[in-house]
Amino acid sequence: MPKPFIATPNKTKDILKKHQFAFKKSLGQNFLVDVNVLGRIIEHAGIDLHSGVIEIGPGIGSLTEQLAIHSDQVIAYEIDQRLLPILEDTLQAYENTKVIHADILQADVHAAIRDNFTENQPIHVVANLPYYITTPILMKLLQDKLPVSSLTVMIQKEVADRMAAQPNSKSYGSLSVAVQYYTEAEVAMHVPKQAFIPPPNVTSSVLKLTMREKPPVSVRDEEQFFSVVRACFVHRRKTLLNNLANYSKALSKQQLTILLNRIGISQTRRGESLSIAEFAELANALYET
Ligand code: SAM
């Protein structure tokens, strides 16, 4: 096993110099250089030697190397072609890793899981995500309904707070409902800027998403449910009734008031106070009209 690990400032600087690698800010390239932080991410992810792991954006392989050591097998998706020869070099000792050159937003992850992991193997997504597309990546992975147990990702603190937020908090919004429809969300830890080269401009947190076996509520139509949720947050300061009146052209304010009364939700409440169960009840009632 090559020592020192990639995730140390000196080794990372050596690799960058050897390959004359120049960071692309547009691809969110901030590489981790703290093995302790990586160890804690892997612990939070619940990885063990039976786990299959999907990584997004291996960079020069700092997290990939630790995942390779602590799991059964790793598939890593990297969009930047310049990193492929570097990864071939840095990960050559780890035969249980496979790098796929692809944009994760375009990739067929279901097929990769079928081709690379054994049936019934617990699969986890672990990544230090490129911050410019955190939400699209996570929503794609969740909406694709991948057979994974959890997603443990380093993202911008503010986004992690929004995804894990509970009703009646400043961060609670349609993103919290969407993420928590599929998962149980928990902010696992915060990571200082010094853990990266180059240091990012924002504060970072590790978010652990544990997949639910089934959604916590039953909705008539998922797409309609999410569009009702989004509508209730369009103007955060407006009441539920006013936001719904803008959304539902078919129903008058009076009809909406009757509908809200029937399901026991006050028309003067704001979207930010509704639980997922209440959003589901509201969306199902609207669906039936
Ligand atoms: N995992 C490495 C680490 O922790 O040091 C690098 C993380 S860096 C924050 C994000 C990585 O994602 C970069 O290597 C970047 O090139 C890659 N990336 C950016 N957009 C991507 C996409 N759409 N699909 C796959 N990889 C992407």
Image (cartoon, helix red, strand yellow):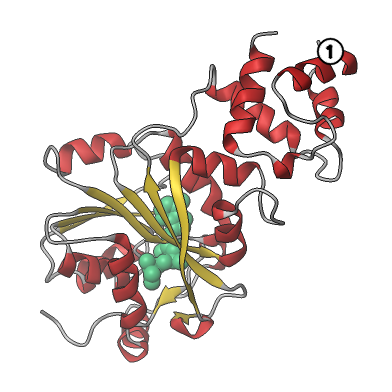
Picture layout, residue 164 above or below residue 275? below
Please provide percent x and percent y for residue 85: 27, 66
Q: Quadrant of the C terminus?
A: top right
Q: Nearer the viewer, residue 109 or 271?
A: 271
**Residue 224 sits in quarter:** top right
Is label 1 in a helix, a strand or a loop?
Answer: helix
Which residue lies at the image location 84% right of the left edge and 25% below the top edge? 246
Question: Is residue 47 left or right of 150 when viewed as pictured?
Answer: left
Mark 1 is surrounded, within 10 Å at the Cα level, by few (under 14), some (14 to 19) or many (20 or more) other residues, namely few
Location of mark 1 (residue): 255
- Where residue 67 appears, as percent x and y from the top left, is 23, 65
Quadrant of the picture in which ligand 1 is shown: bottom left
**Tag 1: residue type?**
Gln
Residue 226 is situated, as x and y percent measured from the top left of the image, at 61, 30
- In x, y percent, where is residue 228? 68, 27
In which quadrant of the rendered view does residue 76 lie? Answer: bottom left
Quarter of the view holding residue 57: bottom left
Residue 6 in view here: yes
> Is residue 133 visible to the viewer in this orientation of the structure?
no
Image position of 29 (left or right of 147):
right
The one nearer the camera, 280 or 94, is 280
Task: Classify the position of the N terminus by image quarter.
Answer: bottom left
Residue at 55 percent of width and 59 percent of height: 160
